[in-house]
Image (cartoon, grey):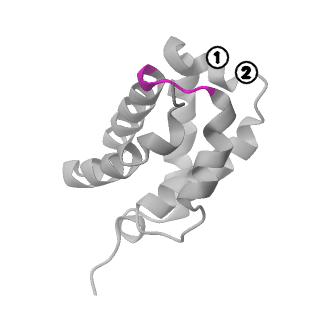
Amino acid sequence: MARTIFERYGGFAKISRVVSEFYERMLDEPIVADYFADVDMRRLMDHQIKFIAQLMGGPVSYSDEALQRVHAHLGIDNEAFDAMARILCETLEEFDFAKEDVDEIGAGVTGRRHLIVAKG
């Protein structure tokens, strides 16, 4: 049986390091930094670790409905979404993820754009 991306890269231990670096970069990015004002970053990172794990074939933690519900009030636009997706892929590359794995994870994120970006 083929191992998932989640298993091949060491599971939650590796994802935790990736997400920590990802949010350091997000907070340095002017396009998205303001979205994190007054946010409990530890709690957010815990959710993000579970979400990225899910995209990598790990345990399923969130439904599309839940993802849409938690982002609905944030007013995230396409520019911010694109910056987030770019930063995530750059971070994965920095952690030596293979291009095809970065592409698969990135596709999982961009495939959920309609759930995260505000309508309007």
Q: State left or right for residue 100 relative to residue 15.
A: left
How far across and how far down the image is residue 22, in percent? Answer: 50, 35
Residue at (53% x, 12% y) in the render: 30
Q: Position of residue 60 (x, y in %)?
A: 54, 69
* Farthest-out residue, left: 100
Q: Residues within 10 Å of mark 1 (few under 14, many from 20)?
A: few
Which residue is drawn at the image coordinates 50% and 15% (left, top)?
Answer: 31
| Location of residue 37 with respect to 54 vertically, above or below | above
Q: For the view shown, which residue lies furthest in the bottom direction?
A: 1
Q: Quadrant of the N terminus?
A: bottom left
Residue assigned mark 1 = 34
Furthest toward the front, the residue is: 120
Residue drawn at 64 percent across, 37 percent down: 72
Residue at numbered disc 2: 37
State which region is magenta.
75-79
The amino acid type of the residue labelled 2 equals Ala
